[in-house]
């Protein structure tokens, strides 16, 4: 297969869709990007990296960071996380508060905001610097030491973070936070505001397609832990559109409101797509369309 030609073709095929949907502006620092950008990168499990469009342009990774914070907690033996967070799709928006009270402060899964706050809390207890731990992991795995936080985006999210703050206080009221609410929010906003390109993210997530084996050849996660992260991505990685994503793409995936999505073809590759305009459920419209094209043309899916 000519991967480069395939990616160029996909970029061309989704071009008419660019700008459809809406850029997330509930975080004002995110709302200023050009909606018509598009990038796609593929990091093959056995080496090569391919890309097309704006695949080297950094963007705000937002909720994609939740995969890496969960991987770090699990790789350091933090199985206690599964007593603090469930593993079921929520069927509600990523920032919904309603379910959390109904279910006594145990979030539905680690990829909605409430669940990710608990994961960040546990990582903070384990490392003393959850945001820094995620940043260092991303730098190491993508072999790009320049990756860092866009402080304007992090500050903007903090200034407009009333829902996340309400969620964190709700978790604390159920004794499901070990650290102060302010500390957990600061580190959560910091890992969400990390900026990376499609190339960086496809590389950083390559271990997910390699049974947990990272860039240096080190086993970051056991094959069993790795399988489980992919399973939670498939069922919960794109919020209340996870069913539609499984139907159209057929791969474990994780989206962020910056317009990025990573998707994993076990044993073959990790893909990252990016285009800032989102569907109502908060997933990149052109990004999902590109992944749909990719799995339809290659036949690479888990089904
Ligand atoms: N930082 C964003 C938030 O907490 C992440 C949401 C997302 O990407 N879905 O609202």
Image (spheres, grey):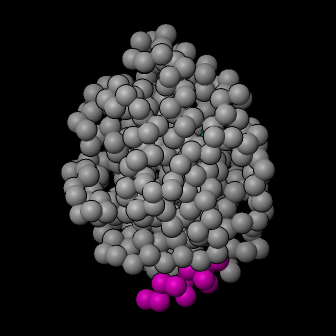
Q: Which residue: 73% across, 42% down?
A: 29
In the displayed structure, 166 sits above or below 44; it is above
Query: Which quarter of the picture shows residue 132?
Result: top left
Query: Is residue 22 visible in this depiction of the protein?
Result: yes
Closest to the observer: 102 or 73? 73
Q: From the image, which quarter does the C terminus lie in?
A: bottom left
Q: Over which residues does the magenta segment extend?
A: 1-11
Q: Which residue: 60% across, 83% down?
A: 8
Residue 52, position as x, y percentages in the image: 59, 77
Secondary structure mainly formed by the magenta segment = helix
Q: Which residue: 25% across, 38% down?
A: 76
Residue 146, position as x, y percentages in the image: 51, 56
Query: Which quarter of the picture shows residue 269?
Result: bottom left
Residue 105, position as x, y percentages in the image: 46, 18
Taking the view exactly as shown, the residue that stands out farthest to the front is 146
Q: Is residue 9 left or right of residue 115?
A: right
């Amino acid at each position: 297969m000519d991967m480069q030609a395939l990616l160029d073709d996909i970029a061309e095929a989704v071009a008419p869709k660019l700008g459809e949907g809406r850029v997330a502006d509930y975080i004002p620092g995110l709302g200023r990007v050009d909606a018509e950008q598009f990038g796609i990168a593929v990091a093959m499990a056995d080496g090569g990296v391919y890309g097309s469009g704006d695949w080297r342009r950094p963007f705000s990774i937002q909720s994609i960071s939740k995969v890496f914070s969960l991987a770090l907690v699990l790789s350091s033996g933090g199985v206690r996380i599964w007593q603090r967070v469930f593993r079921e799709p929520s069927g509600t928006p990523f920032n919904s508060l309603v379910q959390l009270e109904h279910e006594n402060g145990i979030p539905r899964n680690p990829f909605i905001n409430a669940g990710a706050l608990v994961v960040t809390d546990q990582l903070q207890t384990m490392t003393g610097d959850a945001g820094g731990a995620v940043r260092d992991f991303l730098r190491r795995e993508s072999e790009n030491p320049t990756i860092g936080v866009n402080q304007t985006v992090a500050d903007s999210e903090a200034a407009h973070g009333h829902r996340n703050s309400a969620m964190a206080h709700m978790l604390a009221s159920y004794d499901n936070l070990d650290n102060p609410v302010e500390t957990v929010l600061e580190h959560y906003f910091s890992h969400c505001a990390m900026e990376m390109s499609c190339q960086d993210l496809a590389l950083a997530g390559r271990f997910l397609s390699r049974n947990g084996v990272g860039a240096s050849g080190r086993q970051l996660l056991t094959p069993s832990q790795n399988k489980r992260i992919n399973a939670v991505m498939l069922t919960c990685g794109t919020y209340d559109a996870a069913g539609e994503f499984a139907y159209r793409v057929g791969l474990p995936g994780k989206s962020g409101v910056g317009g990025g999505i990573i998707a994993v073809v076990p044993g073959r590759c990790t893909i990252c797509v990016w285009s800032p305009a989102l569907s109502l459920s908060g997933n990149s419209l052109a990004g999902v369309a590109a992944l749909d094209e990719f799995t339809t043309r290659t036949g690479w899916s888990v089904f």
